[in-house]
Image (spheres, grey):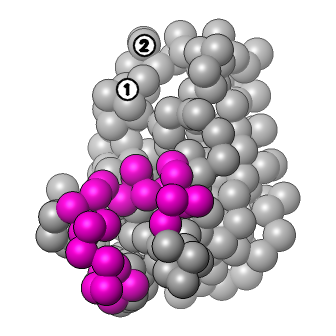
Amino acid sequence: MAFTLPKLNYSFEALEPYIDAQTMELHYSKHHQTYLDKFVAALEKYPQLQDQKVEDMLKDLNSIPEDIRMAVRNMGGGYYNHNIFWANLASESKMSPEVEKALLDSFPSIEEFKKEFETKALSLFGSGWTWLVKNPEGKLEIINTSNQDNPISTSDVKLLLALDVWEHAYYLKYQNRRAEYVANWWNVANWDHIAQNL
């Protein structure tokens, strides 16, 4: 399997003014590319892993040779997490009735869901991700992971929504104002993709 950067369904400037074009270009072509390059390099001496899906590796990190396990966790995680992040973005998207129902089955209201999600993102110390996941019981949960960790490495969940809370995702435009970035991010959330994930 040849690991590559996913093709974006929008231009770098399409998410303006909420995510600026310069951040998008650097985030995608530099940060994401670096995760991909280092992940591919880590797999070079293990040809048998090169045909696996990255998500399968992350789901079973203990099966990865110990000398590259941390690289797969960090670099493979960074590559995979960003693939999800880009798909979760759109210049225009509306929440479908199906997504709204799923959220209301797990949260008191859409406003409470967004408030809880934002609070979780702002409580994350350092760098990491905030996720909306579907647990094995069918309920939706909001969880944080540090660095480039992914929830599928430790639990049997379905990933619905990913918010990158690393400073490189917002610092050019928002500087230290993470709360403003998180609040504005709802304007570019791709609800259609989330509906497909459900």
Percent coordinates x, y for residue 46 in the rendering: 32, 77
In magenta segment, residue 173: no
Looking at this view, is 76 or 127 the one in front? 76
Horizontal relation, residue 92 to residue 124: left or right = left
Query: Residue at left 78%, top 49%?
Result: 120
Query: Residue at left 49%, top 66%?
Result: 64
Q: Residues within 10 Å of mark 1 (few under 14, many from 20)?
A: some
Q: Is the magenta stretch mostly helix, strand or loop?
A: helix
Percent coordinates x, y for residue 63 in the rendering: 51, 59
Query: Which label belongs to residue 98?
Result: 2
Identify whether 120 is placed above or below 38. above
Q: Quadrant of the N terminus?
A: bottom left
Residue bounds of the magenta highlight: 40-64
Query: Which label belongs to residue 195?
Result: 1
Q: Give the CA distance from mark 2 to mark 1.
A: 7 Å
Query: Residue at left 62%, top 26%?
Result: 135
